[in-house]
Amino acid sequence: MRWTKPGIRNTISALLGGDERKTSPEALEPVRQAMLRALGEDGAQLNPQLHRRLQYLHDAHALWYARAEMVAVLSRLHGEAVAVGTVRQLTPVFHGLIPRSLIDACRLHR
């Protein structure tokens, strides 16, 4: 007989690193504003769902992964080279909010 009953959810979250730090909304706001500025009015009109998601995402990782969709939208407006450059300029605002390995992986694909 077990004294503790570890649920599958607890076991999986422990394996995946469930000790994740929670990011305060105040810490995410500069990131959110930088991404919305980069998307611009034209990008918001072209993809209103992305604009809305950027306004309401509450996780630094979710904002990080939304960059790929930003590149797609900005590519349609300005071309791929400009879009990638614009989104790469957002990388410094993520320092301290996401693991360094994600930022380093982004640099390796240059």
Image (cartoon, grey):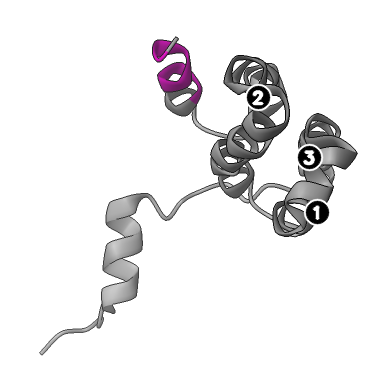
Real-space Cα distance between discs 3 and 2?
Answer: 19 Å
* Extent of the magenta region: 103-109
How far apart, in angstroms, are the residues tagged by discs 2 and 1? 17 Å
Q: Nearer the viewer, residue 1 or 68?
A: 68
Say which mark, if any, is on residue 27.
3
At x 58%, y 42%, the residue is 69
Q: Which quadrant of the figure contains the C terminus?
A: top left
Q: Position of residue 61 (x, y in %)?
A: 56, 44
Question: Rounded to the nearest whole Å, what is the CA distance between mark 1 and mark 3?
Answer: 14 Å
Number of the label disc, if any, that sits on residue 1: none
Q: Which residue is mark 2?
A: 87
Residue 56 belongs to the span the image colors magenta: no
Which label number is shown at residue 55? 1
In which quadrant of the rendered image does the N terminus lie? bottom left
Tally of numbered discs? 3
Q: Residue at x 72, y 31 (%)?
A: 77
Classed neighbour count for the residue bearing mark 2: other residues with Cα under 10 Å, few (<14), some (14–19), many (≥20): some
Indicate which disc, 1 or 3, sits on the residue closer to the N terminus: 3
Q: Is residue 91 left or right of residue 100?
A: right
| Residue 49: quarter of image | bottom right
User: Mark 3 or mark 2, which has the lower sequence index?
Assistant: 3
